[in-house]
Amino acid sequence: MGIRDVAAAAGVSITTVSDALNGKGRLPDTTRVHVREVADRLGYRPSAAARTLRTGRSGLLGLTTTMRSTEPFALTEFAWFAELVRSATATALDLGYALVVLPASSPHDVWGNVALDGTIVVDPADDDPLVHELLRRGVPVVSGGHPGSTPVYGWVDNDHVAAVRSVLDHLADAGAERIGLLAAADGPGADKGVAGYRAWCADRGVPAITEEYEARTPGAGRAAAARLLDRGPDAVFGLHEGCAPELLDAARERALRVPDDLLLACCGEGADPSVTSLSLQPALAGAWAVELLVGVIEDAGAGPLLPAQRTVPTRLSVRDSSTRR
Amino acid sequence: MGIRDVAAAAGVSITTVSDALNGKGRLPDTTRVHVREVADRLGYRPSAAARTLRTGRSGLLGLTTTMRSTEPFALTEFAWFAELVRSATATALDLGYALVVLPASSPHDVWGNVALDGTIVVDPADDDPLVHELLRRGVPVVSGGHPGSTPVYGWVDNDHVAAVRSVLDHLADAGAERIGLLAAADGPGADKGVAGYRAWCADRGVPAITEEYEARTPGAGRAAAARLLDRGPDAVFGLHEGCAPELLDAARERALRVPDDLLLACCGEGADPSVTSLSLQPALAGAWAVELLVGVIEDAGAGPLLPAQRTVPTRLSVRDSSTRR
DNA sequence: GGTATGGGGCGATACGTTTCTTCGTAAAGC
DNA sequence: GCTTTACGAAGAAACGTATCGCCCCATACC
């Protein structure tokens, strides 16, 4: 039951059916109504594939994360990414698009089998080959996280340096004098965060106490947390999402009371309601990335081609773990 | 740069290019290699839209949840659903499909704009209109949760009754004699859970102590938890995901110590590591639903048309909250 | 009466594949 | 020498839609 059948049943031409259903052309309302009624009666639904082929628009957005690690969907485990995806999906639907989550690489050629109107690449590598391939195919790309030297149509990102400073300022205000930093070397925004920390320490003239680890290595976080606490800080900031348990455990093993002996702050959505946490607000990032992307798609050719950028604010939730009694 | 250009550049026909790239037809390897090389050099990528139009297969699976509540994506807030989606996405990709999450209804006609090879409907209503519409269009449907009288190709579901019994048995073993049940009236599987609870109580000859509430109403959970504890149970089981905080708060307000005065068990993934929790294993449900659906799609016409069913096991993690010291 | 004008509608083409059928040729069988 | 078989490749017809341009017929206008 294609458009042809509707045309036949309504006694008009294919053109007229198409125009009537899409609100185009010059047709009297009587014809429009008639055609719509016949189409409804037959239960006609236009073929998405044919429409996509003809118009070049699929109504689909891709969302991917290029893994620095080899294993696919490494980021999926993070609440940060999950929340970003959730928000991006909802926003895309609001704007009339559907969103499909794809791996940067796959044994099956999924990218080749899906027609995408645009793609969001989260945390792209520098000069990301996937991004280049997409741009070559004419697919607009917006990145989540600063794209480095990769040329994209726009991006959203946190101001990682300012975010780190806000946490450090808070800890200092609470009385901390030796603030340690626990960072995952390969986490998104880690380098910026560490740089911000060092700069802050330099500004204040205090020593930088950092321990880094490979987030992918099981147990590395625990070990690094232990090393960090052994260096005798009176406050610690965990830059990697969900590292609060590691730090709390390490503190407990050393009989350090939180917050009495050790102030604690951590990145993430604050799974533990007693730990001061810095949210990167992934929901905002996801929504804004979609908005940017859809803007690019629908302005195609018209708008300015300067990459649009939006800075996602962070939110510091102060809890018991960093509040001196 | 369509297939035509490749054919011209390689000095062969369109048919030959198609056959060479898709591994079909009878061609000598020399030709195959040559064509592939030329295609690579030109950076040719077949149009997904055209392929979909021609073959009728898009490589896309839909995933939706029909909301009993009016607001879209109500379930999205649940970790259960989020985990199911995550797992379904990964499994789909493993099998060469991409997955797109759609709302049951939307101001934009998203369903009409996406060509789906099949759809997973989570927690469908009885005689779900969306399911009927999909089946009418010839789109295979697999449901998450028992489909009731809706005719689908298959479904996955927990054995809610057995799951509830396992929790109740555990609480009874731990010494509980008056076990209360807190249930959200509109939660997935709630009716089955409550029925299982009543049956178990009847079997044992103990009174049923239940409180139900509307999960959508803010504060209703707190109130119901309070009512339940006021009825003096020595153990409670929260059927709704994430209701542990409500129960714990209510216990604290009444100076009931957990587990000394009150044993506590809850559904969910065990966000609180001290609370005994019953996981419905959404990751398994998502993966299996996709496997079932892909099986139906790829066996189209060949296999038996009896709906395939798989029961997802539950997992009870016993923690401090239900362990008598 | 001839010609602008404009509303109403249709024919035909293009989008880029996949695939069914056909065709020629060369080797093999009798 | 004539028919069968197999191989290598190509022609052309779909798939179902959107849309450009054209045609026809009234009515109105000079």
Image (tube, coloured by chain):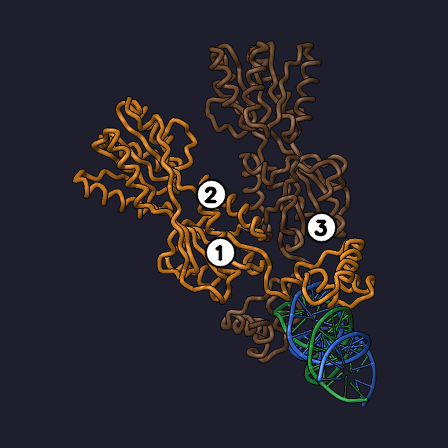
Chain colours: A orange, B brown, C green, D blue
Q: Please give the name of the residue rendered at 52% of the width and 52% of the height, measured from the top-left corner.
A: A102
Point out which mark residue A293 bears. 1
Q: Which residue is mark 2?
A: A283
Q: Give the residue drawn at x 53%, y 34%.
A: B79
Q: Is residue B80 above or below residue A15?
A: above
- Mark 1 and 2 residues: CB-CB less than 8 Å, in contact? no
| Chain of the residue under label 1 | A
Residue B85 image-quadrant placement: top right
Q: Which residue is mark 3?
A: B139
The residue furthest left is A205
1 or 2: tag closer to the N-terminus: 2
Assess disc 2: are there few (<14), some (14-19) or many (≥20) residues with their C-alpha within 10 Å of its C-alpha: many
Viewer-side label of 3, 1: 1
Which of the image's four quarters has the N terminus of chain A? bottom right
Q: Element type at marker 3? A: loop
Pick the residue in front: A313 or B281: A313
Task: Same chain for labels 3 and 2? Say yes or no.
Answer: no
Q: Amino acid at mark 1?
A: Leu
